[in-house]
Image (cartoon, helix red, strand yellow):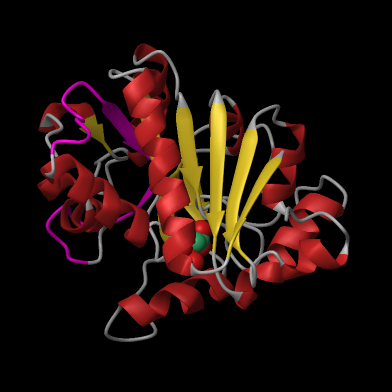
Amino acid sequence: MKICQTETYEAMSFQTARLIAETVAEKPDCVLGLATGTTPVGAYRLLSEWCREGKLSFARVRTVNLDEYLGLSEEDPHSYHFFMQEHLFRYIDARPENLHLPCGTAADPEAACRSYEDLIASLGGIDLQLLGIGRNGHIGFNEPGVSFDSGTHIADLTESTRAANARLFEHPSDPPSRAITMGIRTILSAKRILLAASGPEKAEALERAFTGPVTEQVPASVLQRHPDVVLIADREALSGLARRGFAGP
Ligand code: PGA
């Protein structure tokens, strides 16, 4: 694993956006795996700016998002479809038909999971998968206890994850309790993984993921098995790893 330590959220966002932009420059029709959450918002803002300034084009890029809540329509402001439009897709020159998320309103969610796996395979696999990390070590909606052999599947969200996401909803009981998420196997099949993290509340999760045993109780620990992981994080998020002598300069 390569670690890139920054001082601030803004610098973490810059490094994250830069790695994504380099990937697009090297392979204009690359497949980007994208994530939602607070962490990537700054990077998406920079990518939007660079695209508007003509420094970068997503014209041939294909994207696949990690996850989507079950039961929320694309127009629901809490859906990840909506999030991606608001934070990235509406600002870039990508073709709408090349932007994919799991379907949260599928009549047959199990079939939607299978077709999402087929879609990723038909695109030729993911070149770069962007990930955040949950305080409990989740990646995507792969919560503690998930099988490392999971493909795209329906996940029951833990109370801690629903509580963490409740800040984005009007009422604490509003976050859906289920989602469609890429599985650990899906994520690990990406050629390169970019894990971004910011803030002290991520320090323990990163420490457990990268200095502890590889265990399904800490889903992100499986990243120890991937040959090309780049961790871009600010000093506070890396404080646990630094204590163990892991962090970069
Ligand atoms: P966050 O979420 O970026 O909002 O912190 C990350 C995650 O839970 O995977």
Residue at (45, 48) in percent of width and height? 16
Looking at the picture, how far across and down is residue 98, in whole percent? 20, 27
Determine the residue positioned at 42% across, 25% down: 117
Judge left or right: residue 48 versus residue 164: left
Provide residue 85's location: percent of width, then percent of height.
Answer: 17, 52
Q: Is residue 116 visible?
A: no
The picture quadrant where one finds residue 173 is bottom left
Query: Which image quadrant: the C terminus?
Result: bottom right
Q: Position of residue 134 (x, y in %)?
A: 58, 63
Q: On screen, 237 above or below 106? A: below
Q: Residue at x 20, y 21 (%)?
A: 60
Furthest toward the front, the residue is 249
- The magenta-colored residue range is 54-77
Question: In the image, is 232 to the left or to the right of 240?
Answer: left
Q: In which image quadrant can residue 71 be found? A: bottom left
Q: Nearer the viewer, residue 48 or 248?
A: 248
Asked if the magenta segment contains residue 23, the reply would be no
Residue 159: where, in percent of width, then height? 55, 74
Q: In the image, is residue 105 above or below residue 237?
A: above
Q: Is residue 76 magenta?
A: yes
Q: Is residue 137 left or right of residue 60?
A: right
Specify the quadrant of the image occupied by residue 38.
Answer: bottom left
Judged from this view, the residue extending furthest toward the bottom is 171
Q: Is residue 138 above or below residue 184?
A: below
**In which quadrant of the rendered image does the N terminus lie?**
top right
**Residue 28 in view (yes/no):** yes
Decide whether the magenta segment is chiefly helix, strand or loop.
Answer: loop
Foreground pick, 87 / 180: 87
Q: Residue at x 33, y 54 (%)?
A: 70
